Every structure is written in C-alpha cells, then in structure tokens.
Image (tube, coloured by chain):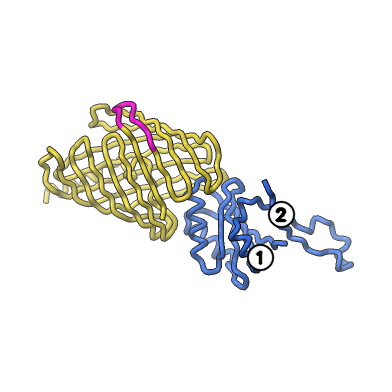
Amino acid sequence: MFIRKVSLALALSVMPALAVMPAATAQEITLSDSQITPDMRAALDEGGSLVVVDVLGAVCDFCALAMTRTFERRDEVAAATVDLDAKTLTFVVHEGRTLDDATITDLIRRAGYQANGITRPEAV
Amino acid sequence: MKQYAITAAALMLAVALAPPAAQARPVSYEGGRTFIAEHDRSMSSVWAHYTPHHRYSIGYRGEWHRDDDHAFHGAQVTWLARRWFGEDYQANLYLSGAAGLAYGVDDNPAGTGPAGSLGVMADWETRRWFVSYMARGFSGETTGQSAMQAARLGVAPYIANYGALHTWLMVQVEHNPEAENPVGVTPLVRFFQGPLMAEAGWSVTDDRPFLQLQYRF
C-alpha cells in the first residue's frame, strides 16, 4: 500500500545556535492512504491545513460516519475521514480558516465520541 | 380513569426496559436521522428517529405484534444514559420509552387504547466482538401486557476499515414468556457499510426469518 509521508520538518541548520540540537527536534508523522482522501489532498494542495485527532470509541462505520458528517457540515472544513485502524479522524481546514482544539473536542463529543489528542502536522 | 392508572402502573413496573427492535440503536450524531425496520419471530416494527442531542433521539415507532394480533403507533424517546470509551472498545447503556395507541388487528377485537413501552439495552463492542443485552416491557389498555428480553453475541471474521464491507456472524437468544416457545435462538449475519446496516437470520426455534435494516441519514 502506498504510504504518504507528511513531515513536520523544522529547519535547524539555518541557525548556528540550533545546530547543536538533537535531530529528534524534526518531527515526522506518517499517514496512510486511508487517512487522507483525494478530496483532502486537493484541499491541501489549495493551501488547507491538516488536523489529526486521536479518537476513543470509534469501532464501527456508524461511528466514523457520525464524525465525518459532523465535521464536513462545518464551513471551515474542506473534507474529513476516519481511519478505524489508526483510530483517528483526519480533516483539512480551508486556507485562512481555523478550528481551535476546544471546538474540535466539542464537535467530537457532539458526534458521540471522545477526542484523545489533537495534532496539526504541516504537510510538506 | 382506573384503567389508565393501571396501564401507567404496569408501564412503571415493566422494569423490562429496552430499545424497540431487538438490538437497534437510534441515537446518532447531532442532527442525524435514523430509519430502522425489523421483522423478528413475533413482531414487525418500523422507526424513524431524529437525534437533536448526542444523548437522545426522538421519533415515530410503529409495531405489529403478529403473535398477539395487535398494532402500536406512537412516539419514542431513546436516551443514551452512559457511554464508555476505550482505544479499542465502546460500551453503551440505553433507556427508552414509547407512548401511543394500540389496537387489535386481524381476529383480535380489541379496541383502540393508550399503550406504551419501557426498555433498556446495554452493549459492549470492539471491532472483533459484540455482546449485548436488552429487555422490554409493553402495556396496552386494550391489548394487554408483554415482556421480553434478548442477548446477542457476535464476531467479525475479518476486520474492515471505514467504507469497506463489514461482516458479522451473530447469534441472538430471546426470551418471550408468553410465546409458544418462550426461548428462541436466531443465528444471523450482519452486513455493515457506511450508512447502511442490514441483518438477516433465521429463528431455528420457530422456523421464521429475522430481518433488520438500518440507515443513517
């Protein structure tokens, strides 16, 4: 299966003061195809930003459906999907729009589930 | 008036709680709608529910008690009393109540009268295993009282991701004290994909089909 890598690379070499810092400072998140749909890729290409939410209790398609529909109804969200294997909800926010962590947590709750961590990787 | 009081008391005493269709769960995401149709060994039912809040759903419920020859039409509320979450599991406790009118059909001369039901359902599921229990009490002023309980065990022979076809093999054991065969066993297969869930089985006790369809809008 094709694996898409989304890296959070923080350039350390440009600043001499940071050159001594360990390489681990550069984060890397690997997402599978099932975590990024074609619609999400298109939204990323248009300047959108990616959000990954670890979710508790997502064990079936009704769970996934509840979360994707709840988020895709929001004007800020271009596209969303759930990966039951990774236990994540991933979605893309339109360029220039934001969804803060409190709102995301509340939307997950309104879908009937519970957020267990939110990350905002920077697609490269 | 006394009869109404008796009916109300019977409902209160029907500690047998339960969501209508044997193992159906109408509580969805906020703004979601659920359609459910079920045909089991003794009853056929239809519901159309709306979820205004992630903790409860409201809607229409109609049922045809084929063994007792009576029908019910009413409003139902299903409340998600508690949901437990884990990385790999989900467990739920639901309470439900319905109120409406019941009347005799076919050879049953019973007239129209107030009726209702109370129910409870609990389930625990992972992507591989499913266990549930439900109980329900029904009381109608003109159509009498009944109670039933059911338990279900299921296993998914393979694990599928969101959007793929999920398949479950399940067995349901029902207990209807008033039935000719009080304890019934129904093996069934569940297919699940996106907004659609369909179940088909066969009551080996009564030699009757079991069918259920759920759709989430």
* Chain whose colour in the figure is blue: A
Instruction: Check whether the beta carbons of the residues at disc 2 and disc 1 lie within 8 A of each other.
Output: no
Q: Amino acid at mark 2?
A: Lys
Q: Quadrant of residue B205?
A: top left
Above or below, B197 against A54 in this view is above
10 Å crowding of disc 1: few (<14), some (14-19), many (20+): few
Above or below, B88 against A42 in this view is above
Check the image and name the residue furthest to the bottom: A96
**Residue B211 shows which numbered tag?**
none
Q: Residue at x 56, y 65 (%)?
A: A78
Mark 2 — residue? A5
- Estimate the x, y position of residue B66 in percent, counting from the top left: 22, 37
- Estimate the x, y position of residue B9 in percent, counting from the top left: 21, 46
Please tell me the colour of chain B: yellow
10 Å crowding of disc 2: few (<14), some (14-19), many (20+): some
Comparing labels 2 and 1, the label whose residue is closer to the camera: 1
Mark 1 — residue? A45
Q: Chain of mark 2?
A: A
Q: Residue at x 63, y 60 (%)?
A: A41
Q: Residue at x 66, y 65 (%)?
A: A45
Q: What SS does tag 2 mark?
A: strand
Q: Is residue B136 left or right of residue A89?
A: left
Q: What SS does tag 1 mark?
A: helix
Dot placed on the residue nearer the N-terminal end, 2 or 1: 2
Q: Residue at x 36, y 57 (%)?
A: B50
Q: CA distance from mark 2 to mark 1?
A: 15 Å
Question: Is B129 contained in the magenta span?
Answer: no
Q: Chain of mark 1?
A: A
What's drawn in magenta, residue-wise?
A: B200-208
Question: Is B202 contained in the magenta span?
Answer: yes
